[in-house]
Image: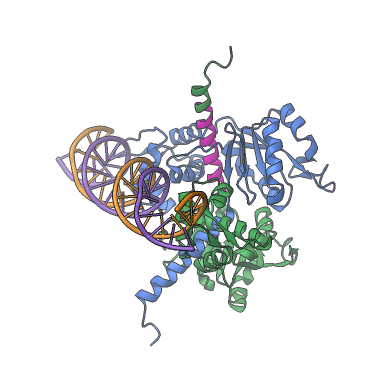
Chain colours: A green, B blue, C purple, D orange
Amino acid sequence: MANIKVQKMPTIRRLPTYLYKLSEMHKAGVGIVATPELARYMNLAEIVIRKDLAITGVSGQPGVGYKVCELIDAIRRFLQWENPASAILVGAGSLGHALLGYDGFEDYGLKIIAAFDADPDKIGTLVHGREVFDIALLAEKVRELKVELGIICVPATYAQEVADAMVAAGIRGIWNFANVSLKTPDHVVVQREVIAGGFAVLSVKLRQSMENSDRTEPELKD
Amino acid sequence: MANIKVQKMPTIRRLPTYLYKLSEMHKAGVGIVATPELARYMNLAEIVIRKDLAITGVSGQPGVGYKVCELIDAIRRFLQWENPASAILVGAGSLGHALLGYDGFEDYGLKIIAAFDADPDKIGTLVHGREVFDIALLAEKVRELKVELGIICVPATYAQEVADAMVAAGIRGIWNFANVSLKTPDHVVVQREVIAGGFAVLSVKLRQSMENSDRTEPELKD
DNA sequence: TAGATTGTTAATCGATTAACAATC
DNA sequence: TAGATTGTTAATCGATTAACAATC
């Protein structure tokens, strides 16, 4: 099952955004940042920012703020992004392409070093500089390259067998973009990404926004 | 600010997954589904499933289960996915391609009808059957095609100006894949998608999994 | 009637928010 | 000292889980 429950999920999900903003500030030569500025950037209340940053263990200076560098280091340490984990990606379709093309992952402790596919037309090609191998070579390559993570971008129907192959090859963590919940042994961790889930939230927000405007501006028409 | 707060977020995020599974069952001719089966599929406790389904308003039959069709309809109604909303997408890079290429959105009440980009090399091309227009034509096309939603897939630096253009053109909802929080007027709803956030969660899960195995199998070595 | 499942009510748990003292 | 911000403690709120009666 590998049913690890993570606490402070909302905070953890925001950490990459802090990291991005802080890196920008660092590049711009800014050394100190205080809660109000981050609150404005994140569109969140100040108290949320302070609680979020507390998770990393850094302490700021009352009346002043936090050291940008310290925060960057602490977030990267908290997420274990100090030395990038190497990953392989299975499924060189359009989503696979998109993930292979995203440079930002390097900053996020993720290095996708190879791709795999079952389609003979794709095997042997290069996608954003990474070779696409025959899926049959998965186990071999994973062991050879000492890969820890697997990213699944295949259609739902094939996702479980790909996961099984990854597990058999010794992978410890799976980032699953396919539309199924995977069954894996306890020592393998799975994170499922449901992009449509975000769209569902947007849809509900839209409905609420309509309802609100109906209530607050009822007689705008005449 | 448009700071709409949505309750039962976790449930809402799972609805598309139920919808997918239920549609599969429907196609396979299954008429009734009970909690235990969904619990197995979702890797969740039965009580979670029942609470999730309750949000849609359908009532099942004790001892039997829920009607698959009823659930499908109710979920689609709840999310207002009965008649698809039309959307335009800005930024025909690799992520834009991936979203344009994802067929599943049709089932999820989303119809991306056109794309926009600033790159002259991309303008005029077709991506998965949709034309890529000059970003300068955004307002015109949005009004002409009566578009309600905008999807932002441009680099963080350009995201705010794209959002401003969308708002000016009359768009009511923005799905934002760029690495910034957008500022929009109150009547415009924004949903930000931080894909790296999922990876952050995976990273924390991995750490916890390591810590667990350290604790439970301490003397495996000898 | 027996077995299975729903759906309600209550209990627990964690996350969010508020207030404010401590610190620079 | 005055102003700003941190970080702690407590209060509120909502989500998750458990127990079980009601229903088929």
Magenta stretch contains residue A198: yes
Q: Kindly identify the residue that appears in the image at 53 percent across and 21 percent down.
A: A217
Which residue is most to the bottom?
Answer: B222
Viewer-proximal residue among A156 and D9: D9
Can residue A182 be seen in this snapshot? no
The answer to whether A131 is drawn above or below residue B72 in the figure is below
Viewer-proximal residue among A134 and B124: B124
Which residue is most to the right?
Answer: B120
Q: Main secondary structure of the magenta part?
A: helix
The C terminus of chain B lies in quadrant: bottom left
The N terminus of chain B lies in quadrant: top right
Image position, residue B115 (x, y; %): 74, 41
Quadrant in the rendering for residue B131: top right
Can residue A190 be seen in this snapshot? yes
Image position, residue A53 (x, y; %): 48, 59
Quadrant in the rendering for residue B220: bottom left
- Residue C16 shown left or right of residue B128 in the figure: left
Q: Kindly identify the residue that appears in the image at 77 percent across and 30 percent down.
A: B140
Q: Kindly identify the residue that appears in the image at 58 percent across and 73 percent down.
A: A83
Q: Kindly identify the residue that appears in the image at 82 percent across and 43 percent down.
A: B123
The answer to whether B121 is drawn above or below residue A121 in the figure is above
Start and end of the magenta stretch?
Answer: A195-211
Image position, residue A109 (x, y; %): 59, 67
Viewer-proximal residue among A143 and A43: A43
Magenta stretch contains residue A56: no
